[in-house]
Image (cartoon, rainbow, N blue to C red):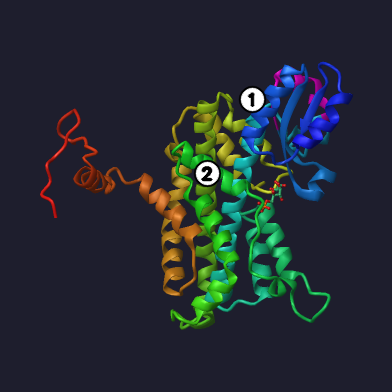
Amino acid sequence: MDAVIDELKPHLQPDDILIDGGNSFYRDTNRRGTALAAAHLQFLGVGVSGGEHGARIGPSIMPGGPKEAYERVRTVLESVAAQVNGEPCVTYLGPGSAGHYVKMVHNGIEYGLMQLIGEAYDLLKRGYGFDNDRLHDIFAEWNTGELNSYLIEITAAIFAQKDDRTNGRLVDLIEDEARQKGTGKWTSQDAMDLQVPVPTIDAAVSMRDLSGLKSQRTAVANLYTGPTAGADPGGTDAAGKIVGPLGRALYGAMILTYVQGLSLLGRASQEYGYGLALDEVARIWRGGCIIRAALLDDLRRACRSHPNLPTLLMDNDLAKTLQARSADLRAVVQVAAARGIPSPGLMSALAYCDGYRSARLPANLTQAQRDFFGSHTYQRVDAPGVFHTEWPQA
Ligand code: 6PG
């Protein structure tokens, strides 16, 4: 991007607008915007989602930078963006790197959702022995209900795709090593810097990394035994019974992944001065982009009704929705663990919710340990102030 800017600069005149529509790291966008402003050029950092197809039929567009520059290109962006109910999936998000930051978190959520879908696939395929036709039917059926979303839709299509070199299905012939360009990792890294928990996104990044350790996995697979893959002691009837709970568990875990991403955006908006309207972010993610999903309507409404809630988990309607799926999420996680199917995405989503609904966590013990070994002090529940104890040395 820097090289392209250097190439373009001699051809630009004061007040020209340069648009970076790639997945640039937000701090680079800040640096470039500052340098170009000094040269009297206007720089817009614009996240664009939708892949090759979206580029042709209408992507979701996430612009940030000088407001006056946005206003000058607004009609162009609005006319190329995806439309949902007559509204274009684009809006001015905020100054500086606001647009690229929102796109980064979009991708972090994308990683989380893909991991969750992968776990559902693994449980159905390895855990219960479902074939690709059945998987296609389940995902296609899910896509007609509350799980309706782009990623569920393309997953159904993937199971149906025949291989043109063999008689098999293509999905079975693709190497199980996921690559990444880094936007999910940036999301996790920045969330850690801002101390915002995004455990499902973290789990997704870690599992992409673990997938890449193929030769190690192959060696370790010979050393450890576990529940037999594909075994279904309950027979077909039991297998059929997992589909409903799994769909509801997936829905709950997906909502929890968006909640994590939106929490990060809320915190980043304060820290970096973006002034993000989260209901508008949810709105422009409803069409064109990879994480478009029917459930974004509910998230948009929750963000709009309570723009100042510290977490969307405090929204009453969302709480009811999640509460109604929590028993299924818990049951599915238990089944996955019992069958030896790695499910850190589903587990982390459940633990995120369980952590939030724990008015008291074991962090008291962490504080005692920190004070024990490092005199880091602690606070008491029954008195104000900072305390230290002379612990008996072990
Ligand atoms: C989108 C996609 C797009 C791209 C990702 C892939 O919103 O259209 O997110 O930006 O496909 O960068 O990311 P990974 O290579 O990290 O999986």
First of labels 2, 1 by sequence position:
1
Rendered image: mark on residue 189: 2
Whether residue 68 is in magenta: the answer is yes
Residue sitting at x 64%, y 62%? 178
Q: Residue at x 54, y 28 (%)?
A: 269
167 above or below 6? Answer: below
Residue 323, given in percent of the width and then of the height, sits at 42, 50
Q: Label 1 amino acid? A: Gly
Q: Residues within 10 Å of mark 1 (few under 14, many from 20)?
A: many
**The disc labelled 2 sits on which kind of residue?**
Gln
- In the visual, does 75 lie left or right of 99? right
Task: Please give the label number shown on residue 275.
Answer: none
Q: Position of 350 compared to 277: left or right?
A: left
User: Is residue 252 in view?
Assistant: no
Q: Magenta segment, principal secondary structure?
A: helix
Residue matched to label 1: 94
- Over which residues does the magenta segment extend? 63-76
> In which image quadrant can residue 34 be found?
top right
Return the x and y of residue 237 as percentages of the image width and height: 52, 79
Q: Nearer the viewer, residue 364 or 238?
A: 364
